[in-house]
Image (cartoon, grey):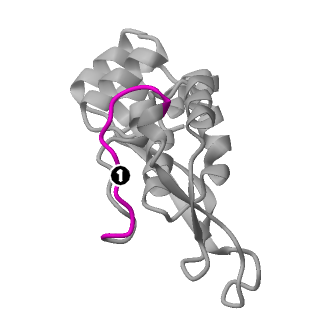
Amino acid sequence: NALGTVMRLINMGLERYMVSYAVCGAVAQRLVPKLCETCRMPYKVNPQSLLKLCEQCGIPPETFLANKKPAVEGEVQYINAEGGAAAFQDLVFYKNIGCDHCRGTGYLGRMGIFEVVFFNDELRDAIVRNLPMAELEKIAIRSGFKPLALDAIEKVKAGVVALDDIFPILLEKSAT
């Protein structure tokens, strides 16, 4: 991930102060298949499965509900309920089907999932003070950093990427 760049450079022998003041920012990306807009098919999410996924990956369930907008205006009405499986009962995602347009694969091209971290004074100071990676991430998030998992979830909510295709990114989140 982007913040992992800090540790990688330090492990390569660079001093913390050098890394914190010489690096302006870092980018991480993953490529995932992009759903074919011609044949993608909406489906209702199994609420228990989604809650289990959130628990397994350490992602707050509200992440799938926050700022919810229909992929196509008027197509899907999303709920604003709080907590529990009931909050997910009307949540709709998309999956690949296959058509002539995409040669039966259900996908057309790839899409990037990104995270970008900019090093501000607070983050630089935290690196020099050898704060844990979790603290660095909190500082970065306060400054507008959006982790890979969040970007991936936003693209699933937009109907551009299938939930199944971002599992590896979500599982990376739980490993860190």
Q: Is residue 148 above or below residue 135?
A: below
SS for callout 1: loop
Q: Is residue 133 above or below residue 35?
A: above
Q: Residue 53 is drawn in which quadrant?
A: top right
Residue 67: x %, y % from top left: 29, 47
> What residue is shown with label 1?
78
Instruction: Give the residue at the far bottom of this rendering.
Output: 100
Specify whether residue 87 is painted magenta. no
Q: Is residue 155 above or below residue 97?
A: above
Q: Tell me if 168 is positioned left or right of 59 in this view.
A: right
Q: Residue 22 is drawn in which quadrant?
A: top left
Marks counted in the figure total 1
* Residue 176 in view of the camera: no
Of residues 16 and 67, which is closer to you in this image? 67
Residue 33: x %, y % from top left: 64, 64
Magenta span: predominant SS is loop
Q: Is residue 37 above or below residue 76?
A: below
Q: Amino acid at mark 1?
A: Tyr
Q: Which residues are magenta?
A: 74-85
Residue found at x 49% / y 38%: 2
Q: Quadrant of the C terminus?
A: top right
Residue 118: x %, y % from top left: 32, 39
Q: Tell me if 53 is positioned left or right of 63 in this view.
A: right
Of residues 93 and 176, which is closer to you in this image? 93
